Amino acid sequence: MFHFGSGTLWGYPVAGNLAANPTPMKFGTLQDINLEISGALKELYGQNQFAEAVARGKCKIAGKAKFAQIIGKHVNDLFFGQTMNSGQKLTALDEAQSVPAGSPYTITVTNSGQFVDDWGVRYSATGLPLTRVTSAPVQGQYSVSSGIYTFAAADASAAVLISYRYSSAAGVQLNIRQQLMGFAPAFQILLNEQYAGKQANLLLYSCVAEKLSWATKNEDFLVPEFDFEAFSNAGGQVMDLYLAE
């Protein structure tokens, strides 16, 4: 039998430190998965050059999956196992504004009603940053309170770019907090391959995530990498492999 393509991969939280309502979920837009089953070998040597016996000792199953569709509950259920809440804190990136020509020299940003915090102001013409002060700004400075930015009279009519965060009721947020060593969800992994009317299915009974990589690239999509290791569950089950031939 032959198989082609990345296949389909699911994760299902089943034990350990579980988030609320653990749910089996597919790794969306799966790019690839690398599953490696290995064992440590021990050789017995005498006075001769070649081993007289070889035995396999510790065994290990490690996997790496790359997927492009990012879903909050998926990441939380399989990696963090912590609290997920509704709502987001979004970023306004370089919101274009102009300092008024006359007093008061203040700018109320677009999302002032949902303002969270300030992330800097730059001059549009030069890209140079202004310095934030608590009050009474002079040229090249600003102060901010509740989404209202105050500038100096010397900066009247200046075009500026303002970055800040603001809250939104849409989406979700993962609020990751300090936990004791060992805190993690355990999950099952199901890998399905289909080609030419035949299937291969692999089930790992207990896995723990090792790494979640989040690497961006210029002119490319963000494709997180999810690394995990498998181990025996309480019943001694490790892996089932189902093949058409």
Image: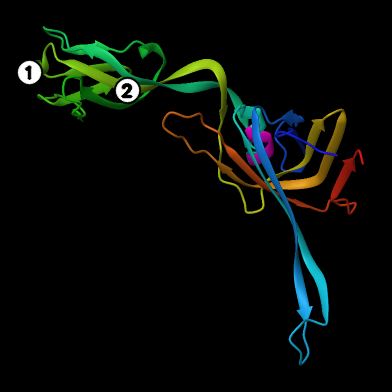
* x and y, in percent, of residue 154 in the image: 7, 18
Picture residue at 13% right of the left edge, 26% below the top: 140
Indicate left or right for 17 with 220 as reference. Answer: right
| Residue type at tag 1 | Ala
Q: Which residue is mark 2?
A: 163
Element type where label 2 sits in the image: strand
Picture residue at 35% right of the left edge, 23% below the top: 164
| Residue type at tag 2 | Ser
From this view, report whether residue 245 is shown above or below residue 94: below
Residue 218 picture quarter? top left
Residue 160 seen in the current view: yes
Image quadrant occupied by the N terminus: top right
| Residue sticking out furthest to the right | 245
Q: Is residue 204 magenta?
A: no
Q: How is the image coloured?
A: rainbow
Q: Nearer the viewer, residue 1 or 9?
A: 1
Which secondary structure type mostly characterizes the magenta part of the structure? helix
Image quadrant occupied by the C terminus: top right
Q: Nearer the viewer, residue 136 or 108?
A: 108
Element type where label 1 sits in the image: helix
The residue segment tinted magenta is 75-79
Residue 81 seen in the current view: no
Q: Which residue is mark 1?
A: 154
Residue 32 picture quarter? top right
* x and y, in percent, of residue 178 in the image: 56, 45
